Amino acid sequence: MTETAPSKLAQVLEAGQFAMTAETSPPDSSSPQSVLDRVICLKDLADAVNVTDGASARVHMSALAAAAIMAREGIEPVLQQTTRDRNRLALQGDVLGAAALGIHNFLCLTGDKMAAGDQPEAAEVFEIDSGELMRQLRDMRDAGSYPSGREINPAPSLFLGAAEMPAEPGDNWPAARLQAKIDNGTQFFQTQYCFELDKVRRYCQALVDGGFTEQAHFLIGIGPLASARSARWMNANLFGVHVPDEIIARLEAADDQKAEGRAICAELLQGFSEIEGCAGAHLMAPHGEASCAQVIQESGLLALRN
């Protein structure tokens, strides 16, 4: 794993500190202030903030534009790039433009199918997949050239990430998939939600035993649960996500379920920070940037940094 100097996220991870990233969706607005209204609460708290790229196949402000607005205000973005909407030429151009605007963290994704969105008749591109996008960006950075061989001068400084699903060690352990993503150029992973501390321990131990944590950084997905009802919805609708019964019961018994959800999330963050192989956490909550900011503060983890 090599440090990418312009990326604060890379610097935190390479220093061995427990990193905390969050997530925002660009607004349905043409106002830059509408971007900042959502994310300013995370400034100086989250090490970086993911900017989603047409999540659920719904159009919003350009992720690149939103990320540039954030970077200008000192909020480090992780720019998500999906291959659903753009071909390789457009994606490569966007990445160079983003780097010129001070954006250096990228999460390569394939993207949701158009059928999931509110304009299902829109054409899908999918000219390349997320793995090929990763390889192309890796080579643009390391070789300083486009796939055609034309020179890029200067080459962009990129810190490249991919998505993963926390898995139980066993017969279906995804060693080959993980190694393929790392070989493609992945330097950090952000995972789907995992609210099971023991599962995170087993997952990270398997990552350590397999040598994966020597090659990439793993940030485990987590988030402040708004209510017991939302926890049950996640169990029913999000593949691979299980909110344990004891957490749901704790939410149900609370006078203020949102506050209890934040407390649970802060406790899990503290637990994650003590697990070997867990490089950090990725906090997600739909329209819940302020709740994620509160969780980071309530966890007390920033105060423990040297």
Image (cartoon, rainbow, N blue to C red):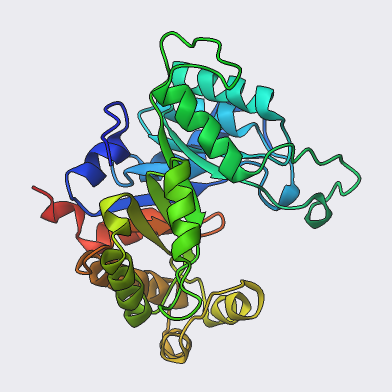
Left or right of residue 69: residue 206 = left
Q: Is residue 3 above or below residue 258?
A: above
Residue for point 26% across, 53% down: 214
Residue for point 43% across, 36% down: 77
In front of the other: 154 or 53? 154
**Can residue 52 be seen in the rendering of this structure?**
no
Residue 191, horizontal then vertical, whole percent: 46, 60
Residue for point 45% across, 84% down: 251
Residue for point 32% across, 82% down: 198
Q: Is residue 282 above or below residue 25?
A: below
Left or right of residue 281: residue 118 = right
Residue 195, horizontal then vertical, whole percent: 42, 75
Left or right of residue 89: residue 245 = left
Q: Is residue 262 above or below residue 148?
A: below
Residue 264, horizontal then vertical, whole percent: 35, 75
Name the residue at the left extreme.
306
In front of the other: 125 or 212? 212
In front of the other: 250 or 207? 207
Q: Quadrant of residue 283?
A: bottom left
